[in-house]
Image (tube, rainbow, N blue to C red):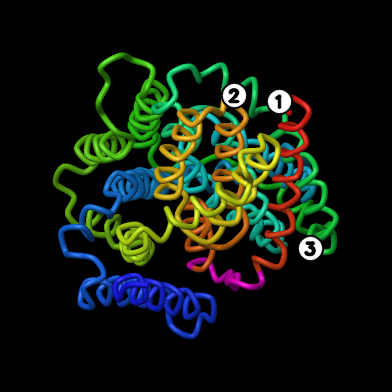
Amino acid sequence: MSYAICAALVIFLTAYALIISERVHRTVVALFGAMLMVLCGVITQDEAVAHIDFNTLALLIGMMIQVLILKETGVFRFLSIWAAQKVKGNPVALLVALSTLVLSCSALLDNVTTVLLTVPITFSLTRQLGISAKPFVIAQIFASNIGGTCTMIGDPPNIMIASAVEELDFMAFIRNLTLPCIISYALTLGILVLLFRRDLRGNEQNRRRILAMSTKGLIRSPRMLRKCLFTLLLTIALFCMHGQIPGWTLESGTIAVTGASLLMLLTMPSRTQVLEKVFSHVEWTTIFFFIGLFVLVGGLEVNGVIKWLAAQAMVLTGGDPTATTATVLGLSAVMSAFVDNIPFVATMIPLIKDMGAMGCTDLEPLWWALSFGACLGGNGTVIGASANVVALALARKEGLVVSFFGYMKLAFPLMLLSVLIAWVYLWLAFL
């Protein structure tokens, strides 16, 4: 084993252990680990920069800015009271309604965008009802990742697979992914309601107070709200068009930053104080955590560690279709729970194509196994998916701290249940 591989593994595993221990802030660990990768010669500076996914960072920053400006209008408080009144202050009904909204939106939008919009509403609602926001945030994390699995545009791994395999079109993803995801979502939500039943008991006095509240005057600036909604709907429309128009080259990050720039131009062209307030509330610690994480994973990828692991898993199956599909699904789920799924999927795509060249006639179940594993596996840990990191960072700002092991103890078994449902579907449909 070469020096570079040994150093990459030591730095990555040490950084990961420190992140799990939570004794040092994860952003500090990720950035210092990334710098060690460069300083120790594991990855060059140019390679490190090349492995930073600026499209994801731009998407996060652009949507954070839009949501923060939207928050200034008072619409989140209005929606929180209106929604609570519609379900008559019933916490379980509210949990189901918000989670289903997240599931639906994540199928058509980026799941990070969805949690950016819904988590602030969630905290406002739970404060009004006097209940814990924890079950709501966790349910929305699961809903965002399961919803993102349903369609071709819901999650980056699906976009990558669709780009690599021409015969897998938009409707093919819906036909093969949606039903298992809906079953998985229903079972997951039912289990979460059961586990958190004590936290979902509303206070009758709080319910009556909420039902008596008036929503008039909660929208502080209707004119700004109209501009925000116009820009947000325009951004969403461009997201939906992405990948559907031949020759379309704009990535989601460009679209998000364009929408944010347009909204700032329309609402605050000369309001320096408001602009500085908006930028000061962007989750910069989350942004820099992702930068460090991209470089850490890049150190493994450049030195062939991820590719070696994937290749070894393929060798173990001996070419058997059932064993290969199960291995791709299981390996994708476990790997995506602990490292970013984008470089892993990028590594697996050529390996699956090579299997076709070696005589494997039916690759379709392998593509769906890769999609299910990479997307659903993100639910397994705090850092398994971008939506998890963003949602829990927003929660931390509101005073709700969910530890790495606390989340994993609950989420990892539920993630395995989702993967098991996907396996049953693949076995019945293809094997």
Given this view, does label 2 or label 1 mark the residue nearer the observer?
2
Q: Residue 205 sits in which quadrant?
A: bottom right
Q: Which mark is residue 204?
A: none
On the image, the x and y values in percent for residue 19 come to: 48, 75
- Residue located beneath label 1 in the image: 430
On the image, the x and y values in percent for residue 310 come to: 50, 51
On the image, the x and y values in percent for residue 52 come to: 28, 54
Locate residue 91 relative to residue 108 in the image: left or right. right
Image point (30%, 14%), residue name? 246
Q: Secondary structure at mark 3?
A: loop
Magenta highlight on residue 295: no
- Can residue 414 be seen? yes
- Residue located beneath label 2 in the image: 362
Distance (Cα) linking label 3 and label 2: 48 Å
Instruction: Looking at the picture, tell me which residue is in the foreground, 208 or 417.
Output: 417
Query: Magenta residues: mostly which secondary structure?
Result: loop
Image point (42%, 76%), residue name? 15
| Region rendered in magenta | 397-406
- Residue located beneath label 3 in the image: 199
Q: Earlier in the sequence, mark 3 or mark 1?
A: 3
Distance (Cα) linking label 2 and label 1: 9 Å
Name which residue type carries label 3. Answer: Asp
Q: Secondary structure at mark 1?
A: helix
Q: Earlier in the sequence, mark 3 or mark 2?
A: 3
Residue contact at pointers 2 and 1, CB within 8 angstroms: yes
Name which residue type carries label 1. Answer: Phe
Q: State which quarter of the image contains the C terminus.
A: top right
Q: Residue 83 sits in which quadrant?
A: top right
Instruction: Looking at the picture, tell me which residue is in the foreground, 196 or 211.
Output: 196
Residue 328 vertical position relative to residue 28 in the rendered view, above or below: above
